[in-house]
Image (tube, helix red, strand yellow):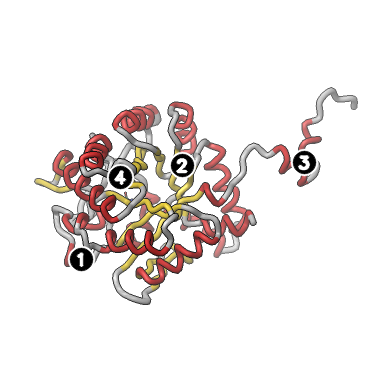
Amino acid sequence: MILQRRNRILRQSSAIRSMVAETSLSATDFIVPLFIDEGNDIKTEIASMPGYYRNSLDHTIKEVKELWSMGICSVLLFIKCKDELKDNTGKEAWNPDGLMQRSIKAIKDAVPEMLVMTDVALDPFSSYGHDGIVENGKIVNDPTVEALVKMSISHADAGADFVAPSDMMDGRIGAIRQGLESAGHTNTGIMSYSAKYASCFYGPFRDALDSAPGFGDKKTYQMDYANRIEAVKETLMDIEEGADIVMVKPALSYLDIIREVKNSVSVPVSAYNISGEYAMIKAAAKMGWINEDKAILETLTSIKRAGADLIATYFAKDAVKLIG
Ligand code: PBG
């Protein structure tokens, strides 16, 4: 055959392939979610997330130091609230001496340059396990937004670099930006979970924080997975209200949404490779059905290729080791 064009020329060796690769991963792409528990010397493996732990603050600090030494520069904090501190107002969420606030300070003291992002939503603090305040069986928007503003300001007071509202209430980004401004936190950023879908893949995370909803589901605030255009609407509104970074969550069943959002905005886009996505790879690898290392790299590269500038992932450390 005499062919005018042979596409396989660019695939014939690993040197050529890496030279022409369109997408590559690096340590600074990753945001590492950390689950923090009260107490000392506590390290609890999460049953549905093998190899991932809920740590007391002393172990968390060690972990953060290690992450920084690996070139990873941001963490996203989640705390497990004691049952006796949970109520329907979620007020433990803005306790200046709460576990979240103490954790932010301790991490910033230990590794000042590490970017500390904090989850802003009431579910870990809610006796109902919902992201908002409940009245007559409904999640009420505006009182919840007021609570989220207090929570955000308390995180910024403690030293958070970014607050990350993951609740999907209406108008919360604008209210949080205003709250931060009036409290003098002009350097605190907002990474908004702009297009967050009601997903079955959050299950293992809710095990980690014991935060599963006590009644119903989250479909009156999180998005319907049948929708694509709505994701763009939500994201553009968040940007107008002041979001510095936007997020699509989950990632894997939503790669089309990541691309759609990436093409519609001019702020950095993040994606959350969530707990259920982690659990599926771990389970299949444990069965010997897939190669875990290859699955991690292929998954994370696909999320980046779809358009994510940043990826929140439980695989961050594995990935950094694998990309060397
Ligand atoms: C709650 C929150 C959830 C996650 C992050 N923040 C769960 C939910 O909305 O029920 C999920 C993260 C994961 O599954 O890895 N505001």
Q: What's under tag 2, amino acid-wise?
A: Ser
Please report whichever mark, 4 or 1, sits nearer to the chain's N-terminal start.
1
* Sequence-wise first label, 2 or 4: 4
Asked if disc 4 is less than 8 Å from ligand 1, the answer is no
Provide residue 304's location: percent of width, then percent of height: 54, 41
- Residue 119 placement, left or right of 11: left
Residue topped by disc 4: 165
* Residue 220 visible in rendering: no
Dividing the image into 4 quarters, which one contains the C terminus? Answer: bottom right
Quadrant of the snapshot with the N terminus: top right
Tell me the amino acid under the disc marked 1: Asp
Q: Locate residue 302, reporting x and y percent.
A: 56, 42
Residue 16: numbered disc: 3
Q: Find the residue positioned furthest to the right.
A: 1
Q: Which residue appears at 31% of the width and 61% of the height? A: 79
**Disc number lying in front (3 or 2):** 3
Q: How many marks?
A: 4
The residue positioned 22% from the left and 46% from the top of the image is 148
Instruction: From the top left corner, tell me how far across and down residue 198 is, in percent.
Output: 33, 43
Q: Which mark is residue 83?
A: 1
Q: Is residue 6 above or below residue 280?
A: above
Q: Please tell me which of labels 3 and 4 falls first in the chain.
A: 3
Q: Amino acid at mark 4?
A: Pro
As measured in the structure, the alpha-carbon distance from the residue carrying label 4 to the one carrying label 1 is: 22 Å
Residue corresponding to mark 2: 253
In primary-sequence order, the first of circles 3 and 1 is: 3
What is the CA distance from the residue labelled 2 to the residue labelled 4? Answer: 21 Å
Compared across the picture, whether 318 is left or right of 180 comes to right
